[in-house]
Image: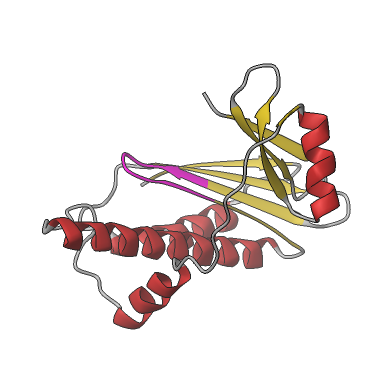
Amino acid sequence: MNFNIRGENIEVTPAIREYVEKKISKLERYFSETPDAKVNVNLKTYNDKTSKVEVTIPMSQLLLRAEEDHMDMYAAIDLISDKLERQIRKHKTKVNRKQREKGNLNELFGSYENAANAEEEEQDLEIVRQKRFNLKPMDSEEAILQMDLLGHNFFIYTDAETNNTNIVYKRKDGKYGLIEAQ
């Protein structure tokens, strides 16, 4: 893995760089071959002494991304490592299930197996509720109002101008985002 570590409002010291590389490199054990991935790490420090760590690992069949806010940067790095590990296990479980159904072997991941974790991740993917509804044509502002009225953090609707299916969602910073389908 190739690391690209950037700091905003903070100097990336050799100790921080070494800690990030050590923690993120532990993820290599989940792959049969060491992935030729570029790991992008963004470290930010704010005036209120909080730190934000963002890690993005684009790979050929998988995009791993996690971010964490914490008062202690090293604790945020630990939490990021755990999040990425869960994402890999979840993806591996999903891929293995699909491969078992097709009768093929999985080549991306190695033989690392932890039955308890795989079972736990498989249970997380169970659909417990299903809804069907007609998408009403509206604009994004009306969709945000509907979302807030329902108390949800996302809302799917048909855009009145383009007739495409769009999604509005509430971001962690309290602002809103829009996903437009093509």
Image coordinates for residue 52, horizontal then vertical, percent: 70, 52
Count every numbered label the image shows and give the total.
0
Asked if residue 46 shows in the view, the reply is: no
Task: Report the side of 69 relative to 121 (left or right).
Answer: right
**Does 78 appear in magenta?**
no
Q: Main secondary structure of the magenta part?
A: strand
Residue 76, percent from left and from top? 64, 62
Foreground: 14 or 110?
Answer: 110
Q: Is residue 113 above or below residue 7?
A: below
Residue found 38% across the figure and 71% down from its top = 122
Quarter of the image holding residue 120? Answer: bottom left
* Residue 61 colored in magenta in the image: yes
Q: Residue furthest right?
A: 48
Extent of the magenta region: 56-65
Query: Quadrant location of residue 51?
Result: bottom right
What residue do we see at 55% from left, 28% from top? 181
The one nearer the camera, 158 or 84, is: 158
